[in-house]
Amino acid sequence: MRIYLRYLLAFFIVVPLAVLTLAQDVPQKGLRDVPNAIRLAPKATTSKETIDVSCWNRHNALTDSRLVQSPVLISPGGLYRAYVEVQAIAFRPKNIGTYVGPLCENTSRLFVASSFDNAFHVVYSQTPDMSSGNSLKIIDWSADGERLVVERDQWVYESDDGAYTDFIVFDPHSASLAVPDLAKILASRFGKGCWSDNSIIGFTRGGQVVIALDPFSNVVALMNGAESCVKHRTLVALGSDHELSVLPRTYKLVHFGRFLDGRL
């Protein structure tokens, strides 16, 4: 599934997290009780690629439930650790001819731990209440180790619409989340009538979030008059002041966190 953004309304929303729930105490919220279908137990794997986790395979055939967990990403200085998990639950209808319920539902979670408390805590969760399909991808820690950026994706299963992509920034010191409305920010820079394929790739040394904009690739939408905001891959940097700046083509991204297995 190719991810793209339509320019809608948005702002930075800061959500304080007064209490962090223990990871092992979090119930399976959001998953509906479906009496006419069997919920299949997920198969667990570990991968950095936690975007677009679903119950379907490449041939668009419904297969099985999946639980994909990212490796643990350690902040510069080693004070904080984080990982994400994305669970896609498949439903096997008891009677396919009369079944009208979901075939797949996702729940995605972000876990963070500190050197002061070795236990991982859930600091953010997406459930099927928000969208039947959703995922999180852990991207990087800032150079000072005080912020974590995570890509967020939401989509509707069995729909021709593409996924909505944005990101969250978690501050473990204040236990708060910043949710920038990327669509409005991009629209203010490139115009409301254009589209692009977007991905979150990291931080600048100064703490700005780096976003890669690629030419819009939805063939059907382009045939119906959609326009691409960029003609080639363009890197932009977004600061906490909501200002968006275009980075030079020669810009070299630096990763500041390190995965527990030692790889970037």
Image: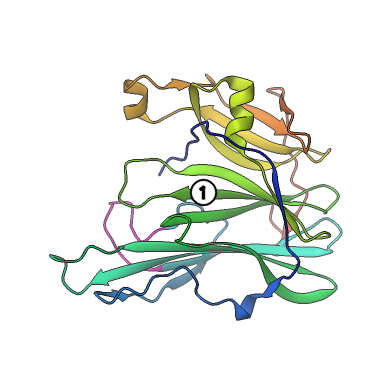
Residue on which disc 1 sits: 153
- In this rendering, is residue 100 above or below 159? below
Residue drawn at (84%, 64%) of the image: 79
Q: Bounds of the magenta span?
A: 54-65
Q: How is the image coloured?
A: rainbow
Instruction: For the N terminus, give its image quadrant.
Output: top left
Which three-letter amino acid code belongs to the residue tagged 1?
Asp
Q: Give the image location of residue 133, x and y in percent.
A: 43, 55
Say what secondary structure mark 1 lies in: strand
Q: Give the image location of residue 174, x and y in percent.
A: 82, 59
Q: Give the image location of residue 70, x and y in percent.
A: 59, 62
- Verify whether residue 11 appears in magenta: no
The answer to whether residue 49 is seen in the rendering is no
Residue drawn at (82%, 53%) of the image: 146
Front position in the image: 135 or 33: 33
Task: Tally the marks.
Answer: 1
Dominant secondary structure of the residues highlighted in magenta in the image: loop
Q: Is residue 184 left or right of residue 2?
A: right
Residue drawn at (30%, 64%) of the image: 63
Q: Quadrant of residue 39?
A: bottom left
Q: Quadrant of residue 182?
A: top right
Q: Is residue 33 left or right of residue 166?
A: left
Q: Is residue 139 left or right of residue 88?
A: right
